[in-house]
Amino acid sequence: MYYIYIACGISLLGAWCYHYLTKNNGYWEKKCVPCPKGAVPGFGHFFSMYLMRKNVFQLGEEFYNEMPGRSMVGLYNAGNPTLLVRDPELVKAVLQTSFASFNSNGIEVDPQLDRLGAKNPFFLVGDEWKSSRQLLSLAYTPGKLKYIYESINVVCASFVKYLNNKVNQGNGEFEIELKDLYSKFTAEVAASSAFGVEGHSFSEDEDGTFTKIGKTIFQPTIIKGIKTMLILFVPLVAKVLKARFMPLEVQQLLVKLVKDMIKYRNDHNVQRKDSLQMMIDLKKSGTIDPSTGREYDDETIIGHATTFFIEGYETSSVTLSFFAHLLASHLEIQQRVREEVLTVAEKHNGITYEALQEMTYLEQALYESMRIYPAAGTLFKVCTSNIELQGCDGITCEVEPGTSVMISLAGMQKDPEYWPDPEKFDPDRFSEDNKQARHKFLYIPFGGGPRACIGMRMAMLQIKAAIATTLGNFTLEVSPKTQLPIKLNPFYFMAAAKGGLWVKIKPL
Ligand code: HEM
């Protein structure tokens, strides 16, 4: 008797799985949206991602390249319809003009498991998203950035000291991995700008607390790869397995760090002009947090401080590492950037905030590096209300609520139709004239529309400061330890080079 129940249970589960995985068969064909061959039953077009052979960055680029000339492409992700939009006008519709129909990033974070991550606007929708976004945006007004730059400048000085020590120990030159190096830089900036403390990131013996936290969360491993994939694409299973973005011990450490800092500032009457102080002041004045309808509390302050740290640390160090690698492999461009840095810095008596605004060729080179290696190669949105999308090629699609929409930055930003010789690193693509001549939504390393990156100006500032400081004092040369051509690590959802990006550094 017992066996009959088990057999029935297994059959029912099997029937449910079969129904779940096949219920949308032929969905795109019925809508007359082109759909590439190769969908694997049960996994759809994303099979190689579930096998951990490719990440969403690489898959998005592949899907984009598979159907040139099409405005949209229909895909299946484990049975769920996913629409890739290729036409920049449709990208604009999804991110900006029809934002009301695509206002969710479609990733839910369980506040019970990720109490700090759950405050990040990236995961929020509706009023909670609006108020959290408004608050965070206040931290990066031009006036605040100028103030933050004082901390960045101090970090730049420690960075040069650290590199000079390494040069001396290495008898005139040394080899280092760029993601590792620039993670120290962004960890230190994030520690001082988000938490108001020194992170000891340039200590000789070991990583500082903030670099350790960053590595624990982000350093690609197969386990983290599986966890992230589940949270992003199979949330039901992630929930059952209680998968968290941020390990519990890291959350506890961050809570303690911020609580101690709030207490220290209150006890010693310390006032700074940073984002932490901005939130402490909101709490002190009894302001109501629109997302909760209650006064600001420590929990919200800790959540937002964590967002500043997490977002400021990883995407910027990914971008810095690829940018420095491209400069190390294009020595003429490296020299041209250096000449600009040295000339402008001489005029301003150093690499000041104002000097960085004048370093236009440095900025062009940075834009070009984010074209080739956007930190986030693929964006996902979820349709929240019915809408018809019309492509420039005559394809029309009624998109239904719940449909996932994919935008491949990596594909679009290297499409030879818009970018001649797309693999070539050519900062002149971003001269003022060339920028004006292009569709605005062809190049979106920071996303676009109402959900565009909040920290864009902060990111540009710290990256330009780090590179200007590096090139103003040292030369970079690609080390033979770098595996060329670069292949991306499939265990990571952003861009990370397999084997790392190694350089030799010498003083000027
Ligand atoms: C080079 C560095 C960075 C890159 C490449 C980057 C890229 C992006 C991208 C592509 C998005 C998604 C935009 C969209 O969906 O349209 C995003 C969102 C976001 N970024 Fe950044 N980012 C960077 C640095 C930062 C920094 C320094 C912060 C500091 C707080 C930050 C905070 C955020 C937040 C909070 C969101 C979510 C916005 C929302 O959903 O409303 N980012 N970023």
Image (cartoon, grey):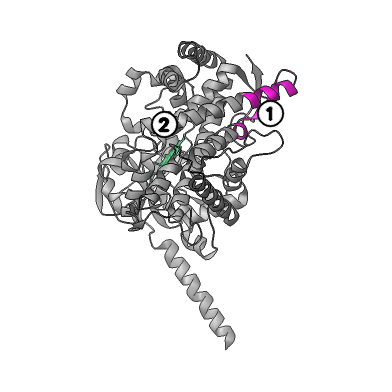
Residue 229 image label: none
The answer to whether residue 40 is visible is no
Pick the residue in front: 14 or 362: 362
Measured as percent of width and height from the top left, residue 330 is found at 55, 18
Pick the residue in front: 5 or 355: 355
Residue hosting label 2: 145
Number of marks in picture:
2
Tag 2: residue type? Leu
Q: Quadrant of residue 92?
A: top left
Q: Is residue 326 above or below residue 498?
A: above
Q: Is residue 19 above or below residue 27?
A: below
Measured as percent of width and height from the top left, residue 467 is found at 53, 24
Pick the residue in front: 30 or 99: 99
Instruction: Give the structural element (helix, strand or loop) at label 1.
Output: loop
Q: Quadrant of residue 396?
A: top left
Which quadrant is the N terminus positioned in? Answer: bottom right
The stretch drawn in magenta includes residue 176 = yes
Crowding around mark 2 (Cα neighbors within 10 Å: few <14, some 14 to 19, many 20+) is: some
Which quadrant is the C terminus positioned in? Answer: top right
Tag 1: residue type? Lys
Task: State the extent of the magenta-drawn residues as a range.
Answer: 161-181
Measured as percent of width and height from the top left, residue 101 is found at 28, 50
Distance from label 1 to label 2 (Cα)? 37 Å
Badge nearest the viewer, 1 or 2: 2
For the point 30% across and 22% down, which residue is it? 436
Residue hosting label 1: 481
For the point 57% across and 22% down, which residue is it? 470
